[in-house]
Image (tube, helix red, strand yellow):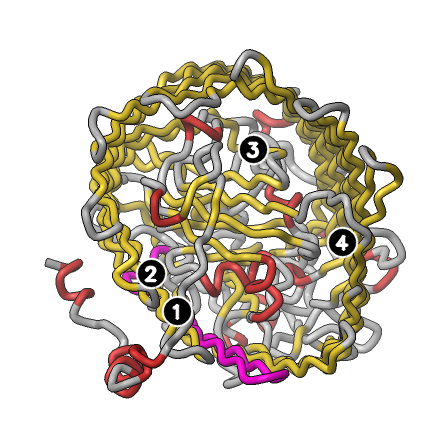
Amino acid sequence: MKLYLQLLRLPALFMLSLCVLSGNTLAQSSKTLEEIIITAQKKEESLLDSAIDVSVFSGEELEKYAISDMSGIALSVPGLTFQNTGAWAQIYLRGVGTRVSQAGLDPGVAVYVDDRYVGRQSGIMFGMTDMERIEVLKGPQGVLFGRNSTGGAIRLISNPVSDEMEGKVTMSLGDYDYKKMEGMLNVPISDNFAIRGTFQHREREAFKKNIIPGGYDYDDLDQTVARLRAKWTISDQTSLEISHLFATVNDLSNMGAVSADSGNARGIALGGITTTRRDQIASSATAVELNPDGPKHYMDSTAIRLETSMAGHDVAIFVNDSMNDERRFGDYDGNSFNDIDVMMTENKSDETGAGLEISSNNDGPLNWIVGMNYFDQTVDYDFDLRIGAIGGGNVAASTGWITYNLETYGVFASFDYELSDRLTLNIGGRYTKEEKDALVRCSQFPGYAQNSRLCLAAALKPNYIAESWTSFDPKVTLTYNLENNGIIYATFASGFKSGGFNAPSNRGAVALEPEEIDMIELGYKAELSDTLSLTSSFFIYDYTDLQVTRAASGGGTVTTENATDSDIMGVDFNITWLASDNLMVRFGGEFLDTEYTDYTTAARVANTILQDNPDALNYGYDYFNAEGETLLRAADLSWFLAADYQSGPMSVNISYSWTDEYDFDFVRHPASDSLRQKAHGILNARATFDAGNGMSIALWGKNIADEVYLNDSVIGGTNQRINYAHPRTWGVDLTYDF
């Protein structure tokens, strides 16, 4: 019933546009829709022929919509949310994801950069440049892509090395002293060897100004990414490619938090200063503490891929190695009083991946792909905790260390068999084994009781924990080709995300159960005419032990635990309409009906705000069964509308994304609704003039209506803090393409 009611809320804006345009523009178009080729199922195929729910953005579309990072993709894909909390990325797809990526916890939506699995969510914080396309795969993708893809997978695919000389340079300027410089150069060294290099640097002043004298401003941006690829075509059947990616990110967006309730915050009770304005913060943190001269996130990655053909089979062998180093400061009280803050956090990981894939290469009724994967990860997580009043000032209270190791193996196979001219059966499966261990240590500084919640007695001694898990996950799809150039398909798939170790700063490691999903998906895709296409799906998810991140008790930040049973049901659709030779309209939407069916340890805060009890370190949590509650970060309705208009040298691209309200956490602030993201719409636009000879100039605006919404909201320290999303911004791009 809830899903049916959501379907009645189709945006009037789109319905009106159809009425206005359908009179005569559809018949006037002399052009046809271009075919979109994807590799979401490890093979090249048309988007309309692929039996999978996937959203695709070409490199040209990314440029049209002024999308420069993952947050822009989230605005264009209904059901996808992305929040940047400093060095950490929070990715949720249909309410499934992970809020933190500390040692022992893994993301719920897998991210791949040129088919390299990114083990830590921080590894996608850099800007995107020279992209061929981006594919967002919805639903469990474990058979072909492996671990941690119960919610879906996001594939970032850069432009390949070509055998032609080409280049591109773009310079951008905008408000808040925004500057961007990016370039691409592809050089053929010989007939069978070429290199392609890309570079991008972005910087921007802070959106939030510190009202404390001597305090440091937050939410600035300083990012650099460089990629070098070399391809050697050894023969007509064999090629070898080596790539190296380097990135640094100085983004303090996580630190721009403000108190959710400035009139009733602990900071005021203790003589501190708070603010709720989105353009202000009140923090006593100084530039010395933040170490602004060094990068907050550093990434270095190398990948090697060999492709060849043997006996009618395509073979790919690949290996990659990555290093990620994150360092950040956490102002967890949201005010000028250093109640409980993390002075410095360092999260350093080393990752090694390797794989072998063999696929058939014939025109017969049977086609297949088999392969194996290996992934190894070591994470060192360090944190220093400081306290204010109870320690007599801004002093260090405890230090913690976590050493985390992961080793995983996977073997998979997928077979396509044409039962008839119209009916195709796909059967696949993956066997996965994962081994994890963690060592947690916590050192209490002199002057604090051993049983202090800052470092529990159990954590004062080294706490070692080790677990292993295995899983077999099948997938079956039946596809029927219609006479009208369309398909219908039905899929059953299961997915697996291994357990982990929840290790907040004041506790020892606590094991989490694996997350498992069974999915049924029914889809319909069709080219309804030369100018109109539709992709749609109906899906049902049954989750067991969904890993949920929520507010932690005891004045901490967040914790992750298992919700015993959860259900998700929804409808997803995308319409592409070539309304005329000059106008293209895209409209997509998603309706979700989600609930926890069994979750006994959810927490809701009691009204013990610290104005009346300034010495308390606790919110006084009440635990309840969240049965019937909507999943966190799962909007009932989200939709996206874009229009691309081209006339001569001028092009105008306008997009509007709408997201219904959703909850960041179960907790409700007694004086506000600060843990709920309100319904909001974001309007973006870009106008481009092609001056000829490879020169173009573009004017763009983001969040043009200056919508006020949240990037994150969380219980931090001893009060609630919120982090506002970016305000209205604008800029100009100057591009030379040769």
Disc 3 residue type? Ala
Binning the other alpha carbons within 10 Å of mark 4 as few (below 14), some (14 to 19) or many (20 upward) gives many
Binning the other alpha carbons within 10 Å of mark 3 as few (below 14), some (14 to 19) or many (20 upward) gives many
Earlier-in-chain disc, 3 versus 4: 4
The residue at which mark 4 appears reads as 249
Query: Which one is nearer the viewer's eye here, 696 or 410?
Result: 696
Quarter of the image that includes the C terminus:
bottom right
Q: Residue at x 29, y 30 (%)?
A: 493
Answer yes or no: is residue 451 visible. yes
Binning the other alpha carbons within 10 Å of mark 2 as few (below 14), some (14 to 19) or many (20 upward) gives many
Horizontal side of residue 341 vs 156, given as left or right: right
The residue at which mark 3 appears reads as 503
Based on the picture, tell me whether residue 587 belongs to the magenta stretch: no
- Label 3 vs label 1, nearer the camera: 1
Q: Which residues are magenta?
A: 634-658
Separation of marks 1 and 2 at Cα, in angstroms: 7 Å
Separation of marks 2 and 4 at Cα, in angstroms: 34 Å
Q: Residue at x 62, y 41 (%)?
A: 113
Asked which secondary structure carries label 2, the reply is: strand
Separation of marks 2 and 3 at Cα, in angstroms: 41 Å
Disc 1 residue type? Arg
In which quarter of the view is residue 452 placed?
Answer: top right
Disc 1 vs disc 2: Cβ atoms closer than 8 Å? yes
